[in-house]
Image (tube, rainbow, N blue to C red):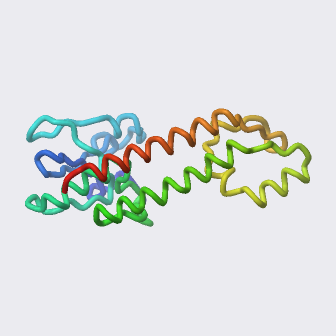
């Protein structure tokens, strides 16, 4: 069921130092009349054991055994590269690499997709006529769909895209994933 108010379905926070997880109570559990707010639910929390910052690993996170250092280091690698176990529970969190080599392969595949998007936006010429726009959507919908809506302005018929911001967005994503790949390769497991 996709409701946040169910007592057994809570966000899991992990402390990589203590190798422990804790489920977090939701605001709606405390006061059922208060609407769910991501601001309150997503603020950082300290570990009750060591006082360090905890990682929000999502609703579907299953922690490894405390003694499994390799698995805990892998979970930390996943978190540091932005991979967590967030979903509403209906479909699960999607693909999660199980080991460091598959994580590196996964990140390299994502990097190639980001580079492909960057190249598209660097060479993009906005279509002018309705016919050009229709052909453009048929040919390039996967690129157009992957760009956040904040870079698009105008109405549906007179849609404009800020090409400079689109290039900056994909450049930042490529740089970030390259950093994550280097960090993952450099981490000892």
Residue under the image location 30 percent in, 46 percent down: 56
- When the figure is inspected, residue 58 is found, relative to residue 93, above or below; the finding is above
Closer to us: 188 or 17: 188
Closer to us: 122 or 99: 122
**Image quadrant containing the N terminus:** bottom left
The image quadrant of residue 3 is: bottom left
**Image quadrant containing the C terminus:** bottom left
Is residue 126 in view from this perspective? yes
Residue under the image location 41 percent in, 65 percent down: 95
- Where residue 159 sits: x, y (%)? 79, 40
The image quadrant of residue 65 is: bottom left
Closer to us: 124 or 149: 124
Residue under the image location 84 percent in, 55 percent down: 134
Is residue 11 in view from this perspective? no
Q: How many marks?
A: 0
Instruction: Left or right? Give the position of 115 relative to 82.
Output: right
The image quadrant of residue 136 is: bottom right
- Where residue 68 sits: x, y (%)? 12, 62
Residue under the image location 44 percent in, 42 percent down: 176
- Where residue 14 sits: x, y (%)? 21, 48
- Where residue 18 sits: x, y (%)? 11, 47
């Amino acid at each position: 069921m996709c409701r946040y108010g169910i007592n057994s379905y809570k966000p899991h926070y992990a402390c990589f130092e203590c190798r422990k997880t804790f489920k977090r109570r939701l605001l709606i559990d405390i006061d059922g009349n208060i609407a769910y707010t991501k601001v309150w639910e997503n603020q950082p929390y300290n570990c009750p054991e060591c006082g360090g910052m905890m990682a929000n690993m999502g609703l579907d996170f299953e922690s490894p055994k405390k003694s499994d250092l390799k698995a805990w280091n892998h979970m930390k690698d996943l978190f540091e590269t932005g991979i967590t176990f967030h979903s509403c529970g209906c479909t699960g969190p999607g693909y999660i690499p199980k080991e460091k080599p598959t994580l590196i392969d996964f990140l390299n595949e994502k990097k190639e997709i980001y580079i492909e998007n960057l190249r598209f936006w660097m060479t993009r010429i906005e279509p002018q006529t309705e016919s050009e726009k229709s052909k453009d959507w048929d040919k390039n919908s996967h690129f157009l769909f992957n760009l956040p809506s904040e870079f698009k302005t105008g109405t549906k018929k007179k849609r404009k895209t800020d090409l400079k911001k689109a290039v900056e967005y994909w450049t930042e994503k490529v740089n970030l994933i390259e950093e994550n790949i280097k960090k993952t390769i450099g981490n000892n497991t």
